[in-house]
Amino acid sequence: MIEAQTRSLANDQMVDIYGTYGCNMTFRLKPIRSNAILFDENLPLYGWQEDIDFSLRVGPYGRIVKSETLRGVHLGIKSGRTSGVRLGYSQIANPIYLIRKGTMSWQHAKMLMWRNLAANLVRSFHPEPWIDRKGRLKGNLLALVDMAIGRISPHRILQLD
């Protein structure tokens, strides 16, 4: 697939973006090593939004850009890496954690959480065969309850199935 790519890098337009997307991100190693930037271990398992957190912490040492010219081949699987309940919980808990940490804006987090909650609610009636929408919705609701009672934490997914 990559060898079949015919676009030229000569006309590449770099566009500044908010943050990177995990399966499509690349970084220059020098600023990461010199500033000891690591992935946040407080975002366990398949740490949803760890890509945004990481890229925003690396951001002050360069630009975060998107290139339409570069190509890669995604080797992921449609069934996911964690249960729907765990991912759904992370869809609420992780943005809240990142707001508190200071690496995600409330505006971005709000849009992200409501978009996922709405998609999980609407699609739970007719879910895609490879997505556990009912599990994600259950996880979203558990996180909202935990937020209301003050115990929301990304680590809580380790207690969920």
Image (cartoon, rainbow, N blue to C red):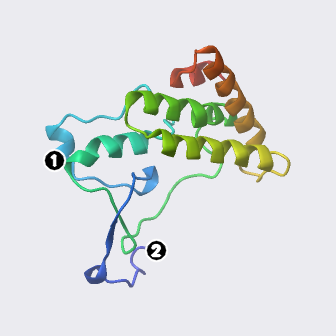
Q: Residues within 10 Å of mark 2 (few under 14, many from 20)?
A: few
Tell me whether the residue at label 1 lies in contact with that at label 2, contact meaning CB atoms closer than 8 angstroms.
no
Residue at the disc numbered 2: 1
Which residue is depicted at the point 46% across and 64% down? 73
- Vertical arrangement, residue 45 with respect to residue 1, above or below: above
User: At which x and y percent is residue 39?
Assistant: 35, 35
Closest to the observer, 76 or 115: 115
Q: Amino acid at mark 2?
A: Met
Determine whether the residue tagged by mark 2 lies in a helix, strand or loop: loop
Determine whether the residue tagged by mark 1 lies in a helix, strand or loop: helix
Q: Earlier in the sequence, mark 1 or mark 2?
A: 2
Closest to the observer, 138 or 80: 138
User: Relative to residue 157, is residue 85 drawn left or right?
Assistant: right
Closest to the observer, 41 or 106: 106
User: At which x and y percent is residue 157?
Assistant: 59, 24
Residue at the disc numbered 1: 30
Which residue is depicted at the point 51% across and 39% down? 48
Q: Is residue 125 visible?
A: yes
C-alpha gap between disc 1 and disc 2: 30 Å
The label number, if any, that marks residue 5 in the structure image: none
Q: Amino acid at mark 1?
A: Lys
Q: Residue furthest right?
A: 125
The image quarter containing residue 84 is top right
User: Relative to residue 145, is residue 42 drawn left or right?
Assistant: left
- Vertical arrangement, residue 138 with respect to residue 14, above or below: above
Q: Nearer the viewer, mark 1 or mark 2?
A: 1
